[in-house]
Image: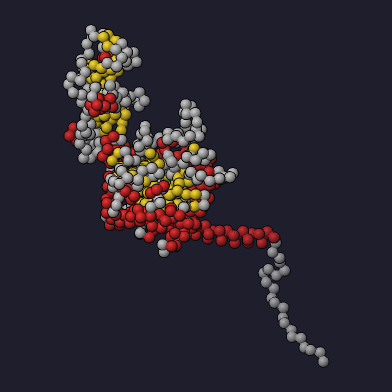
Amino acid sequence: MNPRVAYTAPPAPGPYDGKRLSPWRVALGVIILVAIVAGSLFGYRLLVVDQVRAVTGAAWFAPYVDVTTTPFFAFEKPENDADRNVVLSFVVAAEADSCTPSWGGYYDLDEAARDVDLDRRITRLRESGGDVVLSFGGAAGTELANACSDEEGLRQAYRSVIDRYDVSTIDLDIEGANLEDPVSGLRRAVAIADLQDERRAAGDDLAVWLTLPVAPDGLTAAARTAVAQMLESGVDLTGVNVMTMDYGVDRGTQTMAETAIDALRATHAQLGALYEDAGTTLTAPTLWGKLAATPMIGQNDVAGEVFTLDDATALNAFAQQQRMSRLSMWSLNRDRTCGTNYADTSVVSNDCSGVDQQDTTFAETLQPGFEATPDASAGRRTTPEPVPTVTDDPAASPYPIWTETNTYLSGAKVVWRQNVYEAKWWTRGDDPDNPLADADSWPWRLIGPVLPGETPYPQPTLPAGTYPDWDPAATYTEGQRVMFQQVPYEAKYWTRGDSPAAQATDADGSPWQPLTIAQLEQIIQSGP
């Protein structure tokens, strides 16, 4: 007996019966699937980036400016868009045991306003559309937290600086001995947290950047402690800015940009762990948005470390790719090629980079993709209030009102149409704000506007009879001084019968030269 086999009817023919998928159809399907997945990932990435920008603000570039290095750098007159925002450095304690803020230990805030015209120059920069960030600390001097013995005094010191210059973003540059003291570090963190709370209660904000030294493998233990103290004290840290410079290690064949990128990747991982320890989990894109880099352009302090324009291009590309929120550089004072008289460019200069920049600047190379202003991260408006036009009032002006008949010595400052001008050389009858004047050949240099609440500074005045009046019949030798039309002159060489008046029309040919304001001040202090 044979087993029975069940019969199954064949399926009805379908639309693809007897057809095969060709290779191009398979490839097309794969491409479509990849596009769908990639589109979803791209949309997710855009969503994450939007979230990062909402937390950290738009990306901005601002080079550091050393405020106290002489000659003073004219940050108030940006040469291009890359120079319009600056990080002014450094605010430190006036003395190692003083809780009084100063610029570099050389000028307290009032002295900086008078001797450096800092308040006026900041106002002028803001009127042109730029803004400033204040940097506390630095490699030299004593950071306020290390000098102030209590938190209330420290808060008041920080507050006085922040309020005076009306900033929304500060930079805490903590390094050297200032970084190695955890007690002052905790005092700093608590004070900054309290200041943030105060400003938010008043409807303002305070963006806080912590600038720290870095090695190719990331932050040092002391630097990680500084970050942890900020987070544990409740500081809403805008970000960590690493100083990608002065590594002092064997980099092998790596470029300075490649070493900087290694340091940033290592710090990115460390920062994530520090936030985890503080009870906050952040995504990788958000952490990149909280990172910044500050290279030292050109020749670094360590021999053999030279950050080139190619390095700047590579670092900028990496920072844009990772959506970092800030780039800076040290410093705008140095962003130019050294002169031919500066023979050894391997020695660091405060005034030039030590590399041949041709017609390019490091600022313009590092800025692309970072065009926002620092205020963007703190939600502040960036358009300044218009300065009202008022009549010059001697009682509300820091310097005398300019008059056409007065003679002004080199260094003299005057007020004219609510602005302060400084004489570059002896002048009389030259309108300070002549709109047709060439800036290089005109005797006046614009410093900035008169500020609200200013009062006259004491003006140097020679006591009557300090020098004899010029006598056309007398013989004068080099170095002798006379008065002529109330202006003191000094003989450049032997002369008789040559009126000092000729100096006004032939300065080079005249045997007389007028004294400067600086000479007058020295004479008043020490005697003729």
Number of numbered discs visible in the structure rendering: 0
Left or right of 11? Residue 157 is left
Viewer-closest of 404 and 12 = 404
Residue displayed at 34% across by 50% down: 146
Q: Is residue 90 visible?
A: yes
Residue extending farthest front: 97
| Residue lying at the far bottom of the rendered structure | 1
- Percent position of residue 93, x then y: 31, 45
Residue at 47%, 31% in the rendered image: 338
User: From this viewpoint, which residue is outermost toward the right?
Assistant: 1
The correct choice, above or below, for 206 with respect to 111 in the image is: below
Q: Position of residue 199 (x, y in %)?
A: 29, 54
Q: Is residue 346 left or right of residue 477?
A: right
Asked whether 400 or 216 is in front, the reply is 216
Task: Tell me if 110 is positioned left or right of 348 in this view.
Answer: left
Quadrant of the rendering where the C terminus is positioned:
top left
If the image is split into quadrants, where does the N terminus sit? bottom right
In the rendered image of this protein, does residue 204 appear above or below residue 368? below
Please provide percent x and percent y for residue 247.
Answer: 50, 45
**Left or right: 228 in relation to 403:** right
Q: Is residue 193 visible?
A: no
Residue drawn at x 34%, y 13% as measured from the top left: 509
Seen at 40% across and 44% down, the residue is 139
Front residue of 48 and 436: 48
Camera-side residue: 517 or 149?
Answer: 149
How did the renderer colour the structure?
secondary structure
